[in-house]
Amino acid sequence: MWVLSWNLIFLPQSRNIHVCLILQPNWSQIYSGEKVTLRCEIKEGRRTQWTYEWRTTNRNFPTSSEYRINSATEADSGEYSCRGNREGFSLTPWSNVMNLTVYDYSDPLLLSPVHPVTEGDPVTLSCRDKKKQLLPNVFFYHNDKLLDSGSRGELNISAVSKSDEGFYMCKHSGKDSLQSWIKSVVISISHRLVAAKIFLSHKGACVFS
């Protein structure tokens, strides 16, 4: 008689290790054909050989710390996150989720913050063409309501509040951009500086508390 058995292995999670997903270029809306790199950074006190796991919308699952898209298509749009596997012994938590949107060349592009923004901070949204140049005569919408129209392709919010949350869109020459979601977060005064650096790391450097 043959006896079949399965050994299930559960890897413990290293919850005190921070994982950050960085997007280059540092905006989540890009045009088809552009090159994109997502980098998984793990903050850990000692030198460790990590392999990496990725959650993506397509079937390409690298084991390295970088996820490279050499020529983006609409199929690359979606949510991305990563985590580390330490030599088969433990797993890190999943990183922040990055939402990538790939646009057609003929559409205007609305550039907005990649991460949630801190309540009270200024935010600028810009409507640009495929060369990332500001477009003139742009209309901005918030939750389908017209906010502003004029010659400049930028919308400035001097101090973000909860009422500013929602979907934003810009329109140029009768063509609409895809919608971008903006979320604000409330941070206590004692942690405001550190948290703001995490949420607004637009230079591509991952800052850990």
Image (cartoon, rainbow, N blue to C red):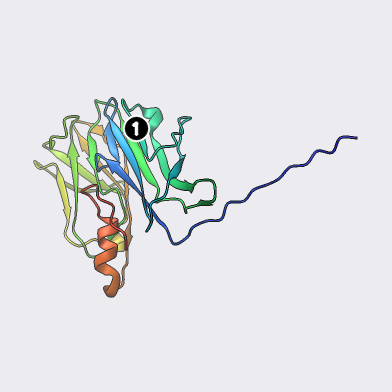
The count of marks equals 1
Residue at the limit of the structure toward the right, as seen here: 1
Quadrant of the rendering where the N terminus is positioned? top right
Q: Position of residue 193 (x, y in %)?
A: 24, 67
Please identify the quarter of the rendering in which residue 208 is found. Answer: bottom left
Q: Nearer the viewer, residue 123 or 43?
A: 43
Quadrant of the rendering where the C terminus is positioned? bottom left
Q: Nearer the viewer, residue 76 or 46?
A: 46
Residue at the limit of the structure toward the bottom, as seen here: 190
Q: Residue at x 52, y 52 (%)?
A: 90
Q: Position of residue 108 (x, y in %)?
A: 22, 33
Secondary element type, mark 1: strand
Is residue 164 visible in the rendered image? The answer is no
Q: Relative to 69, is 155 on the left or the right?
A: left
Q: Residue at x 33, y 55 (%)?
A: 183
Is residue 42 visible in the rendered image? The answer is yes
Compared to 71, does 6 lie above or below?
below
Compared to 163, does 85 lie above or below?
above
Q: Which residue is mark 1?
A: 68
Q: Residue at x 31, y 68 (%)?
A: 187
Q: Nearer the viewer, residue 207 or 64?
A: 64
Compared to 105, does 209 lie above or below?
below
Query: Looking at the picture, which amino acid does disc 1 mark?
Result: Arg
Residue at the limit of the structure toward the left, as seen here: 151
Q: Position of residue 17 (x, y in %)?
A: 42, 58
Q: Relative to 37, is 49 on the left or the right?
A: right
Q: Residue at x 40, y 48 (%)?
A: 97
Q: Residues within 10 Å of mark 1 (few under 14, many from 20)?
A: some
Q: Position of residue 192 (x, y in %)?
A: 26, 68
Please identify the quarter of the rendering in which residue 135 is found. Answer: top left
